[in-house]
Image (cartoon, rainbow, N blue to C red):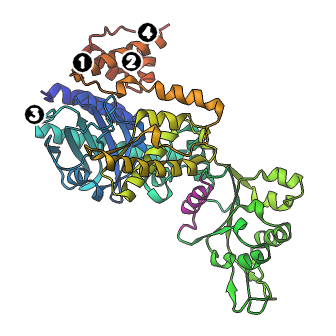
Amino acid sequence: MNQVSNNALLSFALDLASAVTQPNRFEQLVYAVRATINCDAVVLLIHNNAVLTPIAQRGLSEDLMGRRFTIAEHPRLKAICGGHYPVRFAADSPLPDPYDGMVLGHDEQLRVHSCMGVPLYLEGKLIGAVTLDSILPGVFDDIDARALEIIGTMAAMTLNTAILMEQLENKSQHAQHVLKVLSEQTLEMIGQSKAIQELKQSIDLVAPSDFAILIEGETGVGKELVARALHEHSSRFEAPMVYVNCAAIPHHLIESELFGHVKGAFTGADRDRQGKFLLADGGTLFLDEIGELPLEVQGSLLRAIQNQEIQAVGKDQIRKVDVRIIVATNRHLETEVAEHRFRADLFHRLSVFPIKVPALRDRQGDVPLLAGFFAERFRRKLGLQQLTLSPSAINLLETYHWPGNVRELEHVISRAALFAKAESAKDERPTSITVISPAHLTGLQIEKSDKEKIQRAIEHTPKDAIISNEPIDLREKTETYQRDMIRQALEVTEGNWTKAAQHLSMDRANLARLAKRLGIRVTKEVRS
């Protein structure tokens, strides 16, 4: 039975009240739901432009947080968001579950057998949803519908309050647009690492200005994505951002490409042509691979930036323009200046506000999220019902050093998706879940020194991720795991319940309630 008593609803309300004041408020909301309704997994999703984006979850593979669910493509999510009331799906429902194969502690091929969704509406507008899943069938059948409606209403109000508080906090930190970035798929920077959070803060700080920006970073880190985010968060967002790859233009045509030319200016100039500066007038000009620009053109570019004036090749007339300059390079421009391959005055003009995009190996914890994001993208392209990554595959991805950065990861996942699809098609017992395993992750340039470390990572994939053929008591296994985690946290924190709660990303009161339910004695802390 999974009844929700009045006392449970009261505890839920108290948990929500404390959640909005916590820095991890969205995680606290998820925990409050899970503490009220017994289940294997809970996901809190925020709604924007017909897409559901996970913002907190418990019980599913960590790559879920990188996935973006287009509602129209997922029948269960569509059903949940299509009305104002909680939706329960029968254990034998033919509708595919978006989380099949992603429940922690279970085989990747195992389907969800109990699924329930609560749409979160505020003033008639869908702002998000909470989904609950269990491997056991019939778990949610006996929950009172009215109790679920109350939970949904309270969760919606809490989510809205949490979002508003997040916005206010972001404004105080010069980050008015962080939520917008998170909700826009085309400009989204997937990641929760400290490095990526600092990058977002830099973007939000400088974007509203008209400063020239120098974006530095290795090949494949996403410098163009940063440039687009800077433009979208500037006052020029309604004007165009014009892209120029300085490395792809023949040297003798670069001035024409940037400033334009008139008919007859040189051999082959059979008509007048506007340059990229003029096309970007009122907007942003993004010069990628600026380190490849020849010295003879650098002087003309400097004059155009300083005076906001351009002169087309073969034309005497000078024209005024209003262009913001953003440049990117994978070279170290200061070294280029020291070795006289790049003008010092142009370097100083361009680097008013330099932004360093971190390498993927420096973004701790972001690889699973990015892998999930790309897996969902290729699931759609390949027409697969579900595409997941095995725990050992995720371990391998996290251990690899990624010399090609995010671009390399995208290519690895795309190839792996194809291999996994082909292997699944050959399976004598086909399943709706296609799983990417380490064998599918081809093309990784693994150094000898990394091989043993990677092998250990794969071998030490938690045994809980593999389910035995023998029948097990899922509730008992889950509670045993929870007891072990709580006791380990108390050992690490020397019996300090407040610190243990922080270690487990929980509210102290919630931890105390869970501990009592699991038979762990809760002691008072002695304050000195």
Q: Secondary structure at mark 1?
A: helix
- The residue singled out by tag 3 in the image is 142
- The residue singled out by tag 4 in the image is 495
Range shown magenta: 222-237
The CA distance from mark 3 to mark 2 is 30 Å
Amino acid type, callout 2: Met
- From the image, state whether disc 4 or disc 3 is nearer to you: 3
Q: Residues within 10 Å of mark 2 (few under 14, many from 20)?
A: some
Q: Residues within 10 Å of mark 4 (few under 14, many from 20)?
A: some
Is residue 200 one of those drawn in magenta? no
Instruction: Name the spot of residue 248 as percent of width and height, x first.
Output: 70, 68
Circles 1 and 2, Cβ within 8 Å, touching? The answer is no
Instruction: Name the spot of residue 173 as percent of width and height, x first.
Output: 56, 45
Label 2 or label 4, whichever comes before in sequence order? 2
Marking on residue 485: 2
Label 4 or label 3, whichever comes before in sequence order? 3
The CA distance from mark 1 to mark 4 is 25 Å
As drawn, 522 above or below 365: above
As drawn, 13 above or below 312: above
The CA distance from mark 1 to mark 2 is 14 Å
Instruction: Name the spot of residue 424 as percent of width and height, x first.
Output: 34, 47
| Residue 63 visible within the image | yes
Q: Secondary structure at mark 4?
A: loop
Q: Quadrant of residue 428?
A: top left
| Residue 174 visible within the image | no
Label 1 or label 2, whichever comes before in sequence order? 1
- The residue singled out by tag 1 in the image is 476
